[in-house]
Every structure is written in structure tokens, then in C-alpha cells.
Image (cartoon, rainbow, N blue to C red):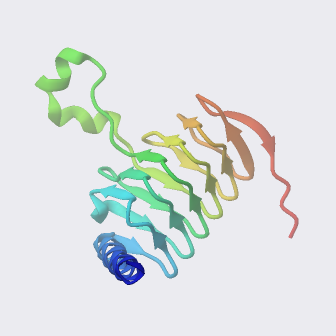
Amino acid sequence: MRLIYRIYFKIERIIEHQRMTSLKKSLKYCGKNVLLYSTCYVIMPQKMEIDDNSSIAPYTTVFATYGVKIGKNCLISSNCGISSYNHIQNSYDRFKNKDEDFRFSRPVIIGDNVWIGMNSCILPGVKIGNNSIIGSGSVVTKDIPENEIWVGNPAKFMKKINIDN
């Protein structure tokens, strides 16, 4: 029985590695030492860029339809949602004018050294500055400046981060 478990977990690791390798190859750009867990999902990976030493944890979904760029040394925790896609707000027009969704969709840009906490949501058009932290469960609806901590729904400024060189 023990041998069966060892074989099963070995096969599982091989499949996970193959899926991660395949996902990395399908990205628009993938830097060095990038970690994408096998259970993270990227919709339209050919429009996503991720730079060196960054990672996306399990069960995170990235809708890169209109572009997502992730900088160096970023940590994106489990179960986050990052979306560059949105749709028309008027329910009648939503099905009538599908081609106009681009007006409400914008690329998402995440700077270097950013940490996004578990269960956070990053909405279309958001730019997160370098060295910033997004607290767990936050919904980011507007741009975040560099060196700041933001938390909540919608995300609000908490405090400035002192960076000593």
C-alpha cells in the first residue's frame, strides 16, 4: 500500500511540473525562477507577462484578456482574482453589444516587490506601485501608489512603508 502511495504522488508531481512548464511556455513573457502552481488558472496566457522571482499560489485566477503584467519578486497568494476584463454595465446592452466590452476593460499592472494577500481581487485598469502590500480579502478598485499598504473592500490606504536602503 505504501508503494502505491509513493508511485501516485510521484506521478502527481510529474503531471504538476508538466502543467506548470506548459503554462510558462504559453505566457507572453516569463522571467527566471517563476513559480506558477498547477492549480492557478490563466485565461488568455498569451497576454500575460510575469517577471523574475515572482509566484502565483494555488487557486488564483488571472483573466489576462486585455493584458496583465506582473513585476519582479511578487508574491500573489492563494485564491486571488486578477482581471483585465469587464463588461457593459447595462444589462440590456450586455448581450446586444458584446464588442463594446473593451471600453470597460483595461490592462492590470503590478509593480516590483508587491505582495497580494489571500482572497484579494484586482479589478481592470488597476496599477499597483512597487513595494506595496495588498491585505487579505481586499478588493482593489483604483491605483495603489508605491510603498503603501492597502486593505479592505474596497481597498483603503492603511500606512506608508519605510524602505531603508
The quarter of the picture where the N terminus appears is bottom left
Q: Is residue 128 left or right of residue 29?
A: right
- Name the foreground residue: 99 vs 34: 34
**Residue 25 image position (x, y, % from top left):** 31, 77
- Name the foreground residue: 40 vs 140: 40
Q: Is residue 84 above or below residue 155?
A: below
Q: Is residue 32 left or right of residue 105?
A: right
Most extreme residue toward the front is 1
**Residue 38 image position (x, y, % from top left):** 38, 66
Most extreme residue toward the left is 96
- The total number of labels drawn is 0
Residue sitting at 36 percent across and 55 percent down? 67
Q: Is residue 121 left or right of residue 163?
A: left
Q: Is residue 85 left or right of residue 96?
A: right
**Residue 123 image position (x, y, % from top left):** 46, 39
Residue sitting at 55 percent across and 37 percent down? 140
Q: Is residue 118 above or below residue 140?
A: below
**Residue 45 image position (x, y, % from top left):** 30, 62
Residue sitting at 46 percent across and 58 percent down? 58
Q: Is residue 17 above or below residue 111?
A: below
